[in-house]
Image (tube, rainbow, N blue to C red):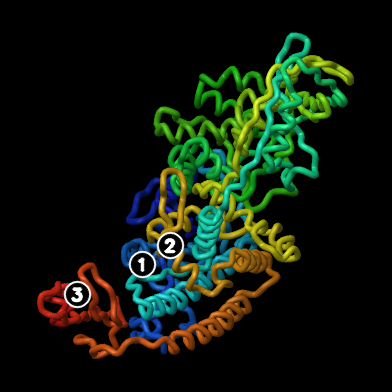
Amino acid sequence: MRVFLCEKPSQGKDIARVLGTTGRGEGCIRGQGVAVTWGIGHLLEQAPPEGYDPQLKAWTLEALPILPGAWKVEVKPKTASQFKVVKALLKEATELVIATDADREGEMIARELLEHCGYRGPIQRLWLSALNDASIRQALASLKPGADTFPLYHSALARSRADWLIGMNFTRLFTLLGRQAGYSGVLSVGRVQTPTLRLVVDRDREIAHFVPVPFWSLDVLLAANGLSFIAQWRPARDITDDEGRCLDQRHAQAAQARLTAGSTAIAVSVETERVREVAPLPFDLGTLQEICSKKLSLGAQETLNIAQALYETHKATTYPRTDCGYLPTSMLPEVPAVLEAVRRTDPSIAPVVASVDSTLRSRAWNDAKITAHHGIIPTLEPANLAAMSEKERAVYSLIRAHYLAQFMPHHEFDRTVADFDCNQVALRAVGKRIVVPGWRTLIQAAVAEEDEDSQEKERAQILPPLQNASRAQVQQAQLKAQHTKPPRPYTEGDLIKAMKTVAKFVKDPRLAAKLKETTGIGTEATRASIIQGLIDRQFLLKKGKAVRASDAGISLIAAVPPAVADPATTAIWEQALDMIEAGTMQLDDFIAKQSAWITKLVAQYRQTMLAIKVPEGPSCPLCQGKMAKRKGKSGDFWSCLRYPDCKGLVNIETPKGKAKSGPGKAQRRGTSA
C-alpha cells in the first residue's frame, strides 16, 4: 500500500481530494491501494533529562552537563492516538510518500516518525509550494527520490539536539546561579532566543545612554521663474561633524545674516539624472513580516499565522515560510493563469491586471537565486476574498501587489541637484520630477518605508527650470535648532530584519563577511516564535509597537557567557546547519563540538557558583537541603535552593512589634505551596 504522510489534517485532506481518495478512517483517508495520513505537527518530541535518568528531574549543579549518549524521543501525550494510527499504517506500507511541508522542519516531522517506527521501505518526496489543486497535481507528477531531501532531516536533527543541549544545560545552570543571587524565577536560555534578546538589550542600552547633541541648520526659501522651492545651507567641512552637521550656533547665525530677503543666489552647478527604480521582489517571509509590522501594525507571529492561513485555508498564496523572494523561470508559463486568478478573486483589481504586461521579465525571475522555495505569490486558482478576515485581505493585497509589480514598468524620475552661492553661503536644492510612475502606482511606498525627514520631503519638490548661472531670490532663511536623535526601539518587524542581517552587528570584518552569506539568526519559519517566546517569558515587553527588554531580560544577558548571547555565535551555528544540509558536515561532528563547548562553559561557571558564599540558614523542612535567603513582599524568608522542584520555605522571625515576614503560615510549617 502507498502511504502519504502529511504534516497536518488539512494538508492531508487537500492531497486526498486530488488523489480521488475519499474513504474516511480514523486519522486517515483510505482509497484503493493508497492511504493518506498526517501528524499534528510533531508527534514525537525530545525526551527530557529524566527520560535518560529519573534522578535528572531534580535541578542540581552536580548533574551538569547533561549530554545524552543515545538520543531518545517520546510520543507526545496529546497526540498519542494519532501516532498509533501512523504507526499502524507504516506497518502496512509498501511505499511511502513524504508530503509534509517542504522545509527542514517538515522533513524532520516525517523522518523521525519513520525512524521511530522502524519503516525501511522505499521513500519518495512530494515537494509542494502551494496547496491549490493545480500545484498538488504538478507536484504529484514530479515526485523527488527520498534521498534528495534526507540531508534536510540531519540538519533539522542537529538544530533540535543543539537547542536541547543549550536549553537544558544553560537554563538549569543560570537558574541555579540566579537562585544563589536571590532570583526565584527560571532563567531560560536558548540557542537563538538569547542572542535575539541580546539585540534588544543592546539597543535599549544605546537609547538609555544616548546623549543628544545640538546642531543648527538653515532652510532657505528661494524663488525663480515664478516658482518657490527650498534649499539647505551646506556649511563648510571645517565647522561640521562627520555627519555634515553644524554644531556651533554662531556659524549658523552668521550664515543666516548673509541670507537677507531679496538677496540673489546664483546657481553654480545644476545636474539632472534619470533614476530608474526596479520593482520590489515578491515577498520572502521576513520581508513580509517587516512590512506588515510597519504598514499594518501586525506582530511577527500574527503575520506568519495570516500567511499560513492564506496558504493553507484559503489556498490564495503559495508556501509562506520561504527565505527567497525570487521566482523560477519554470513558472513563467503560469503567469497568465495567475493573473486571471487574481482578477477573478477580486474583480475590483481588473483594471490594474488589464494594464500589466505579462511579457515583462523583472529581476525576480532568476533560477540562480532560488533556494528550497520561491517568493510568496498568488496561486493559480481563484480564492474567496469574502471568506478572508480584514487582516487576511490586507496581507493578501500586499502579496498580490508585489507580484503584479513584476509586470509593470520601472518607476522613473529625474533627480535634479542644484548648488547655489549667495553672498559666499553655499546652498543646495534637490528636486524630483516623476517621468514614469510605473509600479509605484500600485505600491505607494518603497519596500523600506521612507523616513519622514526633511531630506525626503525636499526630494519630492519640483524645481523650476534651472541651469548654470540661473538666479534665484532669497525670500526667507529659517534657522532651525535641532538635536541628534537616539536609535528607535525595535519593533517586531525591525527585530526580524535584525535577526536576518546579523552580520552588521559583528565587529570582526572577516567573520562579518562570512556571515553575510548566511541567513542570520534562526530561520524564516522560527523567528516569529522566538520573539513570541521571549514576550511570553516576559524577557521582552511590548510597549505599543515597540519591543523593550525587561529587567529580567537585562539580568539574563548580564549573567550568561558573552558567546552564548553573541548573535555571531548563533549565525555560525546556522551556517553549520546549512553545511549539514549540503552534506559537507556530519551531524555527529557538529553535536560533538557543541557538547565539548557546553562542557567547558559549565565547568567554568560551576566554579563561579561554588565560590559564591550563601548565608548559612536552616535545613529545608521538606528535603533537608540547603536554603537561600530571599526577599518577599512582606520581608525576608528562607527558600529551598532546589525550588521549584522543592517548595520548602521557612519564615525569618522578627522582633515583637515588627511586621512578620515570609510567605505565609502554611509555608512556615514547611509545606509546599
- Mark 3 Cα-neighbour bin, 10 Å: few <14, some 14–19, many ≥20: many
Name the residue: 16% across, 77% down.
667
Q: Is residue 408 left or right of residue 377?
A: right
Q: Quadrant of residue 309?
A: top left
N-term-proximal mark, 3 vs 2: 2
User: Which element carries disc 1, helix, strand or loop?
Assistant: loop
User: Which element carries disc 2, helix, strand or loop?
Assistant: loop
- Mark 2 Cα-neighbour bin, 10 Å: few <14, some 14–19, many ≥20: many
Give the residue pinned by disc 3. Answer: 662
Mark 2 belongs to which amino acid? His
- Indicate the quadrant containing the C terminus: top left, top right, bottom left or bottom right: bottom left
| Residue 42: image tag | 2
Name the residue: 42% across, 69% down.
188
Q: Is residue 92 left or right of residue 562?
A: left
- The percent position of residue 278, horizontal first and vertical second, equals 72, 33
Q: Nearer the viewer, residue 193 or 220?
A: 220
- The percent position of residue 77, horizontal first and vertical second, equals 32, 67
Q: Quadrant of residue 445?
A: top right
